């Protein structure tokens, strides 16, 4: 499937990435190759193939959960660059543009 630079640029913007013209061309080519590989996989007939959730027969040995006391909130907040009302404050990742995100 051919992918256009405009589409690749849109994907880059959604991922908050910026590329030079040369990088955008390379990204467009790579994205096109990935889409081609996925389309090839979609052609495989898996009608009678059993669902595989684990490739070996080994079963994980899981320890019993033991409740423990957590770390004091004030101690944790010492590591946060910024906090507000007892919560860690992080940069906004969603911009409010016309026509959606």
Image: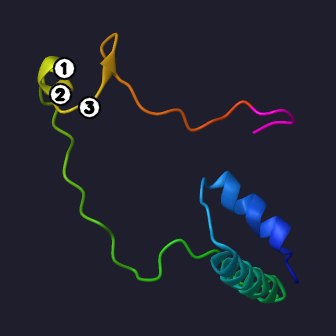
Q: Is residue 99 magenta?
A: yes
Proximity of marks 1 and 2: CB atoms separated by less than 8 Å: yes
Cα–Cα gap, marks 3 and 1:
14 Å
Furthest toward the front, the residue is: 21
Check disc 3: other Cα within 10 Å, few if <14, some if 14-19, many if 20+.
few
Q: Position of residue 67 (x, y in %)?
A: 17, 31
User: What residue does disc 3 label?
Assistant: 81
- Looking at the image, can residue 70 be seen? no
**Residue 73 has which mark?**
1
| First reached walking from the N terminus: tag 3 or tag 1 | 1
Residue 43 percent location from the top left of the image: 84, 88
Residue 7: percent from left, percent from top: 82, 66
* Cα separation between marks 1 and 2: 5 Å
Highlighted range, magenta: 97-101
Q: Which mark is residue 76?
A: 2
The disc at residue 51 is: none
User: Is 12 contained in the magenta span?
Assistant: no
| Relative to 10, 80 lies left or right | left
- Dot 3 falls on a residue whose secondary structure is loop
How far apart, in angstroms, are the residues tagged by discs 3 and 2? 11 Å
* Position of the C terminus by quadrant: top right
- Above or below, 36 relative to 97: below
Residue 98 seen in the figure: yes
Question: How is this picture coloured?
Answer: rainbow
Q: Secondary structure at mark 1?
A: helix
- At a point 41% along the width and 31% down the height, the residue shown is 90
């Amino acid at each position: 499937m051919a992918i256009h630079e405009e589409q690749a640029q849109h994907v880059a913007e959604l991922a908050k990435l910026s590329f030079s013209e040369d990088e955008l061309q390379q990204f467009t080519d790579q994205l096109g190759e990935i889409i081609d590989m996925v389309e090839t996989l979609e052609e495989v007939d898996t009608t009678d193939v059993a669902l595989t959730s684990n490739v070996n027969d080994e079963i994980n040995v899981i320890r019993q959960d033991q409740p423990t006391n957590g770390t004091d909130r004030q101690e944790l907040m010492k590591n946060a660059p910024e906090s507000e009302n007892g919560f860690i404050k992080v940069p906004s990742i969603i911009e409010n543009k016309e026509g959606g995100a």
